Amino acid sequence: MKFKNLLIGIFLPLFTISCIQDEAPNVEAAIDKCSGANIQLININDISREIDIFVFDGANLTAQELNFTLPDGATITPDQPQSNDNPPYYDFSTVKQRKFTVTSEDGSNKATYTLNLYMMELPLKFSFENLREINPYHIFYLTDINGLMQWASGNQGYKLCGEASNALQYPTAQADGGISGKCVKLVTRSTGSFGMNTTPKMPIAAGNLFIGSFDIASAILAPRQATKFGFPFTRKPIKMSGYYKYKPGTTLTDQNGNVIPDKTDTGDIYAVLYEAPNSDFSLDGDLFTADNEKAKNIVLLARIDKMEAADQWTRFDLDFKLQNNKTINEEKLKAGKYKLTIVFSSSIQGGYFEGAIGSELCIDEVEITCE
């Protein structure tokens, strides 16, 4: 017994030391998320370490709230502090571009991010001619004027599966042969073994493009919640028009990869105007789910009834129709309490990982008509 106790006395401290050593300080330095009052849209480029932050007109730029989500133990400081800085509030009143440096918990790694703050309104016409960058996937401008505001897509999430070796193999990409120049091409693609081994299973990734942002941190555990739809809109939309071509894939499958017989894939085009009581409120990929409480905030919807296969450019004209017995409140509209999103998808049930690999939707020359 004494010998046994001696062994315990020797190995227990060693075990304790081992555990302590296993809990070494974190070496990660990154900005995973950023949020704050008056922020309407955020695009985080994890490659160039550039963050575009869009706020609604009228925001107080001397005290913009920025709540950073960082790796465990990491810290963040502005490279050139301003006199009105009082974290988490930062002064962007005189300088709209500021650099922030993240330092890992162990102090060995640093990452400097450039934060750009913009006050912008949504444009009404979209031609898909210009790209923000081409490596490793395509990112579209929302406006051709200065290339600041971006369309969002699931490309960032698709990168995780490692199935694409170039930008044209991603679900969302620019293509030639548009109505007048380029267009956007959305293709439902396989996620390979990666998608079949996730929980939930994600065997396909539908090509998609939407006004909003994509939260890469939620892409695996809550994929539909990763899509944050909408940007403030202060006008009354009455119609969305544009052109599309559509070719469904040959075999429609469900989330488990099982073939769905006697059914053909179809794409989707829609726009939604909804009430946003605060800047953090947004609809997500569950917006058409019957029991989704957020869906009750939808005021206007313009959606294609059923997309037919078309190998030539086909015009669509979709009227905005009132939903949920709601009407537009003029005061709330002026105050930016409504958000608009436009969504395109190569597989209508792609958010639930049902679709046909190879389904292809091309979109061009989209316009929102307002009163």
Image: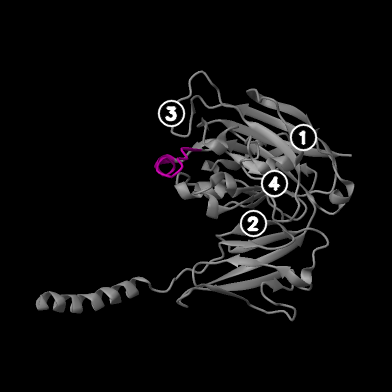
Q: Earlier in the sequence, mark 4 or mark 3?
A: 4
In the displayed structure image, the side of residue 136 where residue 230 appears, left or right: right
Q: Which residue is mark 2?
A: 43
Q: Which residue is mark 4?
A: 211
Q: Looking at this view, name the residue that lies furthest to the top.
A: 262
Q: Are marks 4 and 3 in contact (CB under 8 Å)?
A: no
Q: Are marks 1 and 3 in contact (CB under 8 Å)?
A: no
Q: Return the residue nearer the eye: 149 or 351.
A: 351
SS under mark 3: loop
| Magenta residue span | 192-204
Q: Which kind of residue does numbered mark 1 sit on?
A: Gln
Q: Earlier in the sequence, mark 1 or mark 3?
A: 3
SS under mark 1: loop
In the displayed structure image, the side of residue 254 where residue 299 appears, left or right: right
Q: Which kind of residue does numbered mark 4 sit on?
A: Ile
Q: Which residue is mark 1?
A: 323
Give the distance between the C-alpha atoms of the residues marked 2 and 1, in whole angstroms: 30 Å
Residue at image point 51% right, 46% down:
158
Give the distance between the C-alpha atoms of the residues marked 4 and 2, in whole angstroms: 11 Å
Q: Earlier in the sequence, mark 2 or mark 1?
A: 2
The location of residue 315, given as percent across then percent down, is 75, 28
